[in-house]
Image (tube, rainbow, N blue to C red):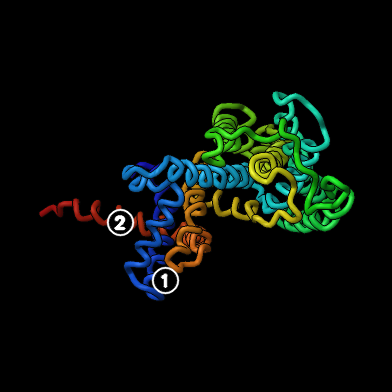
Amino acid sequence: MPERVRQLLPSVLSVLLALAVCWALIALTMEPGTATDAYLQMLWGGIGNWPAYLDGAPATVITRPLGEAAMKAALLTLTGLSVAVAFKVGLFNIGAQGQMLLGALAAAVVGAQVSLPGALHVPAALLGAALAGAAWAGIAGALRIYRGVHEVISTIMLNWVALSLVDNWLVVGPLRGAAEGGQSITGTAEIQATAALPRLLGDGSRLNLGFPLALAAALAVWVWLTRTRSGFETRTVGQGAEAARAAGIPVARRMGLAMALAGAMAGLAGAVLVLGTEGRYPGTLGAPYGFDGIAIALIGNNHPLGATVSALFFGVLRAGGTRMQLLGVHKSFPELIQGLALLFVAGRMVWLALLRRRNAAPAASAEVPRA
């Protein structure tokens, strides 16, 4: 079995097992037919109801679900990249949620308070979000490099600091928006029209520029890691910092750069959320896409393209989850599938041992005993 396939199989088998377990849970509590129908509804809610479209339904039965799935996949891709990039240099970035909060706030402020032409406003807001996320992640990186503070501890703490700083003070205090007539509103001020991410399919879908932006970011990260000297050095540091240092690689610089890039990816996720769908920083950014990025990266085997495929798959499931309610199934089942898949991926060594045993059996039976 090729090595790449062997590395990929544990993630695929984990997702399939998670799907089977959740189907069984629905079937046990309801009916097997209901479980199958609920999965079909989840699929139509993610990729569009193609049977209905072929029967003459309007194109919106396709474009709207695809737009929702793409929007969620874009956020999951960027936060998954945030975790995966840090993994490549040997760091565990659990702070993507806090970095996303800072990025979302920066995008909201630039989008609402800075007046620029449309061609410059969106890039400026995205750049502001990326810098804010990178700066927040840079704190954890600097603590690890210069003071030896483990990044798991510092990023967890920075998540709570970001939550208190942004949601509990800035958004309800100095940066709180005001409606016409001076009445206060929830969240920051509305972003200007020139800062909004353009929608790619008009009013028939919420698909916006954030989706191709996320795909481009994933491709750029993959090229950087596999085709550039600094990317090679980053991966080398992740495989053995002391060996990399002995080989003359600037370990601290590579760690700092990777952590800043990880924060920039999470910051961009916040910008895509604010500029693409919310239109302002809401009262609270409750969506835990930063934490979801951990699952996306691990299921994607910490590979930029693997994380993208994982994000696309779970983006479809998350978008279609609400349609499961039509059959009385709770909409949180896609999150349950994602969580179980992560749990099963954590048993990666068990999967690899089973695959080795399966490969060894035919090889042993093929040996012909000599007389």
Label 2 Cα crowd, 10 Å radius (few <14 / some 14-19 / many 20+): few
Hey, what amino acid is under mark 2?
A: Arg
Question: Is 298 or 96 nearer to us in this picture?
Answer: 96
Secondary structure beneath label 2: helix
User: CA gap, disc 1 to disc 2?
Assistant: 29 Å
- Observer-side mark, 1 or 2, equals 1
Q: Which residue is mark 2?
A: 358
Residue 46 at what x, y percent from top left?
Answer: 46, 49
Q: Which residue is mark 1?
A: 25
Q: Is residue 307 left or right of residue 359?
A: right
Question: Is 313 or 72 nearer to us in this picture?
Answer: 72
The quarter of the displayed image where residue 159 is located = bottom right
The N terminus: image quadrant: top left
Secondary structure beneath label 1: helix
Question: Is 341 or 10 nearer to us in this picture?
Answer: 341
**Above-or-below relation of 356 to 328:** above
The quarter of the displayed image where residue 131 is located = top right
Hey, what amino acid is under mark 1?
A: Leu
